[in-house]
Image (spheres, grey):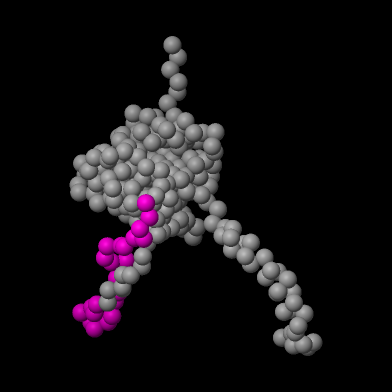
Amino acid sequence: MKRPSRPVILVSNDDGIHAPGIAALASALGTVGEVWVVAPDRERSAVGHALTLHRPLTADQLGPRRFAINGTPSDCVNLALLGLLPVRPRLVVAGVNAGSNLGDDVTYSGTVSAALEAALLGVPGLAVSLVQPTGPASYRPAARAAAKLTQLLLRESERGAMLLNVNVPPGPPRGVKLTRLGRRLYSEKVVERQDPRGRRYFWIGVGPPAWEAGEDTDYAAVHAGYVSVTPLMLDLTDYPGLRGLKDWEAEYRRQSRGRAPGARS
Ligand code: MN
């Protein structure tokens, strides 16, 4: 009997190629397909969807099918899909990130951006993050969950390049919940200190985030001990806003006509 060929899976992250989360993920996905690792050569967390356009990128081969890139997570996926890999992968999986990527935080996340870059280039993307990792071994259940979800996502190929944001709770998960993005409550303040030379400096994003209550959110699911799976969309258009501001076109024309002649400059 002919065995079906193993799907090629690209693995990346934003914690850097030497992070424990990516090792656990690559190992778990080895049971699902042929894994290629293309990841930043150092931690690039919270760089969002940044691309490096003003200096060259290098690909340092660290082993078979394993490359470190001196760039961002999106650089890694772009480079891998558009040149470095000999074949187009069936799927891109990013993570396992050290720490959650929930709700509004997905906009900052390099992990989510790596999966987003894949979806933009027509390849399904899965971002996996672990809430409160406690050590290298704590990534294993998250990586196993990612492998199971990878198998499910591979079966959804007729849906096109889907983008899934997965957050895994600490400890053994109670199951999986499909969720929407939660909303953060921004109450934290910047931390201001003084350096030894008397200059002020600041830290942003310090302190535990607070969240809006919402039963079907990603935050609620991981808080209740479930693996949260949020399908994301790339279209940032505000459709109610688009409908609500329709009269701006005519209003803008009226204002332009209302100007006194010669008042142009
Ligand atoms: Mn990270």
Lateral position of residue 47 relative to residue 140, left or right: right
Residue 132: percent from left, percent from top:
25, 51
Q: Is residue 223 above or below residue 185?
A: above
Q: Residue furthest right?
A: 261
Work out which quarter of the rendered image holds the C terminus and state it.
bottom right
Range covered by the magenta-colored residues:
193-215
Can residue 98 be seen here?
no
Question: Would residue 251 be visible to someone looking at this image?
Answer: yes
Q: Main secondary structure of the magenta part?
A: loop
| Front residue of 51 and 231 | 231
Measuring from the top left, give residue 64's x and y in whole percent.
35, 34
Q: Residue at x 52, y 41 (%)?
A: 161
Q: Is residue 171 above or below residue 29?
A: below
Where residue 262 appears, as percent x and y from the top left, is: 78, 88
Q: Is residue 164 left or right of residue 264?
A: left
Q: Residue at x 43, y 58 (%)?
A: 107
In the image, farthest residue toward the top? 1
How far across and down, in percent of the image, does residue 97 sit?
32, 49
Identified at 40% across, 59% down, the residue is: 183
255 to the left or right of 98: right
